[in-house]
Amino acid sequence: MVIFGLILVGLGALLVLAGLFSSEVTFEDNEATVELWNVNLSTEGLFLAGVLAAALILVGLWSIKLGAKMGWKHRKEQKRLNELSEKLDKVELERRRDADDDNPNA
């Protein structure tokens, strides 16, 4: 999830940077058009591209947060299971020692 979120944030940032640095604005017949990667966009199209970039960034950040939370929860559960396993190993070792002490002929 974290990697997916980073990819989405990267795509959104790439779209924003492309809009800022590689776009060319032309005015014809009292209407502005923007050329972005050899695609002519109207002002509405440019607005929608900005909305798409913002949505990609927000979904990417949400995905990073969700993935980090799931990873943290998984690590916490794994740590708890490791602690329980160590306790179980100690109890089994003590039982074997007690059984060996009770049965000296074995």
Image (cartoon, rainbow, N blue to C red):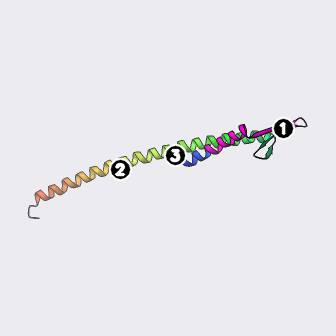
User: Which residue corresponds to the image point at 47% horizontal and 46% vertical from the top-left?
Assistant: 71
The secondary structure type at the circle numbered 2 is helix
Q: Label 2 to label 1, Cα distance in Å?
A: 63 Å
Rendering coords of residue 103 (x, y %): 11, 61
Going from N to C along the chain, the mark reached first, 2 or 3, is 3
Crowding at dot 3, Cα within 10 Å, few <14 / some 14-19 / many 20+, comes out as some
- Is residue 67 rendered to the left or right of residue 106? right
Decide which of 27, 45 is in the foreground and name it: 27
Marks 1 and 3: which is nearer the front? 1
Q: Residue at x 39, y 49 (%)?
A: 78
Q: Return the residue at label 3.
A: 67
Q: Nearer the viewer, residue 29 or 5?
A: 29
Q: Nearer the viewer, mark 2 or mark 3?
A: 3
* Amino acid of disc 2: Leu
Question: Which residues are drawn in magenta?
Answer: 9-33
Q: Amino acid at mark 1?
A: Thr
At mark 1, the secondary structure is: strand
Q: Residues within 10 Å of mark 2 (few under 14, many from 20)?
A: few
Q: Quadrant of residue 45?
A: top right
User: What separation in Å lies between label 1 and label 3 (alpha carbons)?
Assistant: 43 Å
- Label 2 sits on residue: 81
Task: Say which residue label 1 marks.
Answer: 26
The quarter of the displayed image where residue 21 is located: top right
Residue 60 located within the stretch drawn in magenta: no
Q: Quadrant of the C terminus?
A: bottom left
Marks 3 and 2: in contact by CB < 8 Å?
no
Indicate left or right for 15 with 63 as reference: right
Q: Give the foreground label among 2 and 1.
A: 1
Whether the residues at callouts 2 and 1 have beta carbons within 8 Å, the answer is no
Q: Earlier in the sequence, mark 1 or mark 3?
A: 1
Q: Is residue 15 magenta?
A: yes
